[in-house]
Amino acid sequence: MTEIYDYIIVGAGTAGGVLSYNLTKSGAKCLLIEAGKYMTKETFPITEADASAQMYWGGGIELSQDAQMAFLRGKLVGGGSVVNQALMDRFDDIAINDWRDESGIDYFNEGEMNPLYEKAENMIALHTFKAEERTRNAELFSEGCDACEYTWHFLRRAQKDCAFSKYNDCIACLGGCHRDSKQSTLVTYIRDAEKEGLSISPNTLIELIESVKDGIKLFGIANGKVVTFEAKNVILSGGAFGTTSLLLKSGFKKQLPSIGRYFATHPQFMFFGLYDELINAHKGMFQSVASKDPRFRKKGFKLENVFAGPASVAMLFSGYGTDHLDFMQHYNRMTCAEVAIRDENAGEIMVDKKGKLIIKKELTEQDKQRKHNGEAVLKEILAASGAKRVIDSPMYFGLHLMGGARIGVDPVTAAVDPDFKLKGYNNVYICDSSIFPNAPGINPALTIMALAHKLSQQLTV
Amino acid sequence: MTSKYLNQNALKGLTRIGDILIPGNEEFPSFSVYRCLDHVDDLIEYVPKGDVKDLNMVLVILSFLPGNVLRWLVKQMANAHNNQSATGPLLRELNIGIRGIVFSLYYSEKPGHNYTAKNPTELIGFTLNKVM
């Protein structure tokens, strides 16, 4: 006999982790379904190449329809929270007010969002970096900002004990934290939810959901076999691509034409500064500072000081042959920073007849202008910090995948009601970045967690 | 070498293009000398099945192209970010897909079975201290 769950949560990432814990703890019978593997600190891949292949959709990377933009999307229990930078930022007035205006939802205000942020923050260890923790890469970035009189700040990250005093090199944690220091939902919510009785089905890709009398049926593939699940309610938390493609494949676009539209991604453009001195940007804490200049916020971009492993750095440089080798010989004398823009949500998520994901995402004129403005400022900062040469990468990335199933009151422009229900359905909930009304221009992880706490409160009253 | 996912001609095509992307110099081994292709299945295992079929086809074609044509194609791929013509998306996809495999293998810290000299990652000064 088929087991009937109170809630099936599809997607074990940031929102799915929070919801699975809160609902299971409240006594509900829950199943958390994830397309990727269930890995632990003992089984996270060792090398950059293996991590990329095993922990991301598409075997490492997915591309937009015109192959100009690359998307990175975590595929494992814990989802993006295992492979991201774990940066935890609350939205500012600008982002929250824009959401309220765009969606028509009253609870997008500081008074109602702050307690939700507190709830999310209380479940994780947070660390704000200090001056002495900066790598030379970060020092040069902040010195360049100071020289140009631009404001910067220390980042706040969800981490417990990264062992910097023992000279741990943290760049490897992009392939999963081998110390369980990074506060992914795998570490902070999902394991505790399992202790409370949560069932998990990894390696299971849900292909179709169907509303039936008194419940929901889900059909998918697990380890090469067709599987079916039943629940009284389903919560889709597969992220912008996962949730939206499932809604499209399940035929909901007929009733809700906005599904798939309003996709945004905070495109990120990478720049390398080459210096005479030894920098070793891959050593120590590799991301600790970013811009915080109100003038940049107004102009729709921010600058982040980052770095990457050798294979990723090699990919980002367009040259080949001897040019490539010359470039890579400078690996430990480079810094890296990115321009991230607050883009217009003009992208679209689609699926073809075979169910394959197609992402239409071209930069708008405004996006290009924002990139151009950010690039000019970043090059000024790199030059002021002593870079002998600046190299820009022709590749750009979408790491924050948002929209496709927008939340809002208007049924023409939104697919999800303010109470997280898919419009017209009482037992289909959506809670992840797919519901974002627009691109906030701020790291989204903490807000996804806050929204998951809001839905949890609603369902456990 | 053999692969569970790529046929012999595809492996030959990947080696040829790998050596154009990474020809080696006095310090660095070329892609083929490093023999990192021995580990290609570690990556291809996770590529979607449909894409593996397409990859085999493309690499087989590359294996038969004359050297000067292959070098011309690599140049077009490397400059494809500026290509606004109808061939732009295909060239960009090829560029990212093939470079992704070649660079991931070369900087994977997994040398070929008989390779005993320094790894490319050591040569660029990439060493990590992982405190467990």
Image (cartoon, rainbow, N blue to C red):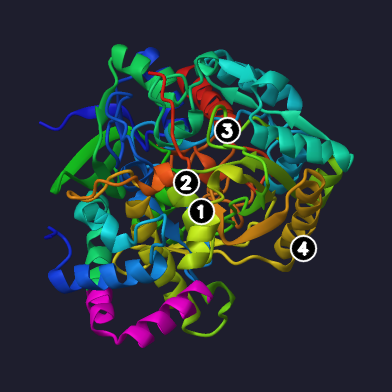
Q: Earlier in the sequence, mark 4 or mark 3?
A: 3
Q: Is disc 1 in contact with disc 2, using a CB cutoff of under 8 Å?
A: yes
Residue at 52% across, 43% down: A308
Kindly indicate whether the residue at mark 3 contacts the one at mark 2 (C-beta within 8 angstroms).
no
Q: Quadrant of the C terminus of chain B?
A: top left
Q: Are marks 3 and 1 in contact (CB under 8 Å)?
A: no
* Residue A360 visible (yes or no): no
Q: Nearer the viewer, residue A1 or A13?
A: A13
> Which tag is nearer the camera, tag 2 or tag 3?
2
Mark 1, residue position: A328
Stretch of the chain drawn in magenta: B57-79
- Residue depth check, mark 4 versus mark 2: number of the one nearer the observer: 2
Does the image show residue A288?
yes
The image quadrant of residue B38 is bottom left
Kind of residue indicated by mark 2? Ile
Task: Name the residue carrying label 2.
Answer: B124
Left or right of A14 on screen, residue A58: left
Instruction: Depth check: give the residue in front, A372 or A30.
Output: A372
Q: Give the amino acid type for the residue marked by disc 3 in the picture.
A: Phe
Which residue was labeled with disc 3? A286
Tag in front: 3 or 1:
1
Does A138 appear in magenta? no
SS class of the residue under badge 4?
Answer: helix
Image x and y of residue A284, in percent:
55, 27
Among the two numbered marks 3 and 1 on one chain, the one whose residue lies closer to the N terminus: 3
Provide the residue designation for mark 4: A369
The residues bearing labels 3 and 1 have C-alpha atoms spaced at a distance of 18 Å
Question: How far is disc 4 from disc 1 in space, using C-alphas?
Answer: 31 Å
Q: Chain of mark 2?
A: B
Q: Considering depth in this image, is A54 or A210 the residue closer to the camera?
A: A54
